[in-house]
Amino acid sequence: MKLAPRFAVLLATAAVVAGCAPQTSDNSSSDKDDQSGTLRVWLFQEVGNDPKAKVVDSVVAAFEKAHKDTKVDVEYIPIDTRAQRVKAAFNDPKSAPDVMEYGNTDTAGYVHDGGLLDVTKEFGAWSEAKDTDPTAKQSVTVDGKLYGSPFYVGVRALYYRTDVFKDLGLQPPKSMAELAATARKIHKAKSDLYGLVVGGAYTYGAMPFVWANGGELATAKGGSGGSYTSAIDSAVAQKGIKAYTSLFTSGNCPAAKCAVMGGNDTITAFAAGKAGMAIGGDFSHSAVEAGKVKGKYAVVPLPGVASGSVAPAFAGGNNIGVLKSTSHRTLAVDLMEQLTSKATQASMFDAMGFLPTFTDVRDAAAAKVPFEKPFVETLAAGTKFVPASPGWSEIDSSLVLPTMLQEVISGKKSVGAASKDAARKMNDAFSSAG
Amino acid sequence: MLVYPIYQLGLISFFQYTQAQVSGGEPTTFKGFGNYSELFSDSQFWQVLLATVLFAAACVVSTLAVGCALAVLLTRVRAVPRLVLMLAALGAWATPAVTGSTVWLLLFDPDFGPVNRILGLGDHSWTYGRLSAFFLVLLEVVWCSFPFVMVTVYAGIRAVPSEVLEAAALDGASQWRIWRSVLTPMLRPILTVVTIQSVIWDFKVFTQIYVMTNGGGIAGQNLVLNVYAYQQAFASSKYSLGSAIGVVMLLMLLAVTLVYLRLLRRQGEEL
Amino acid sequence: MSLLRGLVRRPWRLAAEASALLIAVVVAFPLYWMVLSAFKPAGEIESSEPRPWTLAPSLDSFRRVFGQQEFGRYFVNSLVVAGSVVIVSALIAFLAATAVTRFRFRFRTTLLIMFLVAQMVPVEALTIPLFFTMRGLGLLNTLGSLILPQIAFSLPFAIWMLRGFVKAVPDALEEAAYIDGASRTRFLWQILFPLVFPGLVATSVFSFISAWNDFLFAKSFIISDTSQSTLPMALLVFYKPDDPDWGGVMAASTVMTIPVLVFFVLVQRRLVSGLGGAVKD
């Protein structure tokens, strides 16, 4: 058998050839600023996409009318393919769009990858921008510079079963302590229901507990470097983690079933009538409506620690940005503004139920649709956002926070030990991402 | 088309190479064995590696056993049951992995699944325990990969001249003896390929673990190497670290393959 | 004598057939559940009373699948990709497998193992180098960027597989053919080809399925031209991070699985009885 030596030779030659570096592409910003031509736009494809496309079509029609010799080419891409496509667009500017929609937690990563255009000046000069909700603005901001315009926000609140509450003579909880007590009462009276369905992999369901107790995911180190230090192991944050993980008991939501659940699973359980309460988003509306509990539920803001307060929620949502490689800078920025204008967001709310990012437009929307009221209240009470660091995408994808929660829930580690480990991993990610 | 990407892979594993470098935002820097030492100093990596090896071995053995047994069964039955079984198996094979994993998860769901009802298990959760979660994933992996073994081995048996089999049967040999002494030697080249391929695939299981254990199980207890690589490296575009993991996987699989081929050769089988 | 044997053998065969059918039912059950879920109305897929039937079958999920932009186009694209991959890789693999089996040359073993190496690493690691290769060839955003790597990835396996089938053909047969005055080409196409056909079918099924179900290359190389997209992309629309549409996923998967079954029914006759030539079935 002479295989091994042959391979050694092969590997050796490969090593010798390895003088040169791996391939990279040149994605410096384009200096061109053409005033006509074709603009390419990428938007996310929703499951029922037609109403969205209609609103976009009318914006595009108006835009093409206002700018002579300009064509807009809109493509709808499946959300699940966004990571590969956006990377590919950064690597091959020829295939890249001029304007694109992106999830707001991706902002810092895309900026770090050198893909998004700094639009601080244009956004500041835009007359409508002053009404933008501060958290929404924070979600397009990295190191004090703006890299897009907020398109819509998504936020979570407390869904509860009106029929169950009536049966048991319960009132919607006013504080976190009441929330836990109510959850246990429900499970005790109706053992086939989870009191409050919670998930060990449901980061954005757990974070309000940390924030309400005064904790933070991470704090900015100060200076303009924009680097962060994890604060998940601080005493107040640990208190929040304890409050959330103590819901995983046989008295509410048994660890054996709830530890693996993610956000979708909790909503599914609620929609199927398996839970008295759940933490769900405005975007969960249709899923709950399609379930068994249709007509038997209501929503209130998730309560904070003090009675009558609202727990800070995570402000999710999408932004629209301009790519650095665009050769139609002025036109692209203008189109971005048109796609996220007050008028567009108002019709987008009517068409798709996307919550507007302008406070005045949002209040008008809430007045029209009572279902949205608790979500708008939650937003008004102040929301939080993830650290604007490229390290966040690594923390998110390597499941640092779910792992921490699950370690506590399954009894593998104490809150202190688990949160210290999580903090260490977060700091590694922040520092390695620069 | 094959050699070049591998060459790039090895190259990348020695550099600092993330999306920022790929798109030209930052210069590439040579890191030597930096990526490898980062990997080897992570205690979780070693745990994951061990779990991967054991899990893959269990998958390979189960898949081969089920596939071969059913291939022999196919030769013993008439056309209609044969076609029915083949179509069922083909359906399992053709189902996209994400969908297959989702369906299996639905079937075994403690609240919504029919399996617990049929077996009378109440609301037993299959994904909470480490071993039971691995077992559930193993079932799905076997379900979607045995058809390949079955169809291939069946095709192999059909290619064996039937006179040989008839002669053996006339001599009064039992089924097991026919399989051991007549079929196995004739099918060895095919079995070799099937085994090597199964090892490669099962070592690289990704979708099933990712979907069925929600990204690696409770506190990462069900992580396997490919999912680990995805979470630590590819999802956040750390291609260099991911490539280093890829190289480690490549070397391990290569070693297993070479040892296996050498064993075969020792038994007198020419490659 | 043979009558007696038949009587003894019959119950054995019946038992085998019964178990084959039983196993088929078990194997098909998840498939049945998939199709069933596709027909269930929204909200019933995950209900606390899982029923193996539905009282109100609904085509809504299928409507959402077929209602997508250019769904038919995706379907044709997928057929083109899978079809070209199957035909090209089968032809090349047959010739290459014969070469590596019937001829001995230096580095033959090394070459065979090199074929496998590309499959041993995570595909994500290879998409970046492949991306630059495709960009260099100007194939990005075309079906070519899917066909080429798919052929490259299915060939090694196909060659390995067919090698086994070619080897199983006794050398004596080849000698006999030459003694009868057959040329090399004639032996290759008229004697060897039919003999290894079942193996060719098995490998074709394999390459068809892997090309048909490919997500990763389609996600990475078809960037800006949706008209070149393939069917799996139509499936991915239903995976929304916060609100996945399981009915749509199941319906799209059902639609995707059917062509594979059709392809198999078309070729399976060859797998079961396609042996001609010197070795009689």
Image (cartoon, coloured by chain):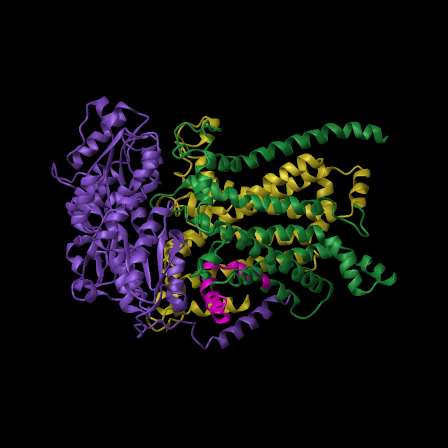
Give above or below for C110 relative to C70. Answer: below
Coordinates of residue A250 in the picture (x, y in percent): 30, 30
Q: Would you place residue B253 above or below residue A238 in this image?
A: below
> Chain in purple?
A
- Residue C265 visible within the image: yes
Taking the magenta stretch, the answer to whether it contains residue C133 is yes
Q: Nearer the viewer, residue A193 or A17?
A: A193
Image location (x, y in percent) of residue A398: 34, 53
Q: Colour of chain B?
A: yellow
Quadrant containing the N terminus of chain B is bottom right
Quick one: quadrant of the C terminus of chain B?
bottom right
Q: Which is nearer the eye, A283 or C105? A: A283
Q: Is residue A406 left or right of residue B210?
A: left
State which chain is coloured green. Answer: C
Q: Residue at x 28, y 33 (%)?
A: A249
- Using the image as rendered, state which of residue A414 and residue A334 is in the foreground: A334
Q: Quadrant of residue A253?
A: top left
Q: Position of residue A205 (x, y in %)?
A: 26, 43
Give the magenta range.
C115-140
- Residue at point 33% right, 30% down? A274
The residue closer to the viewer here, A350 or B217, is: A350
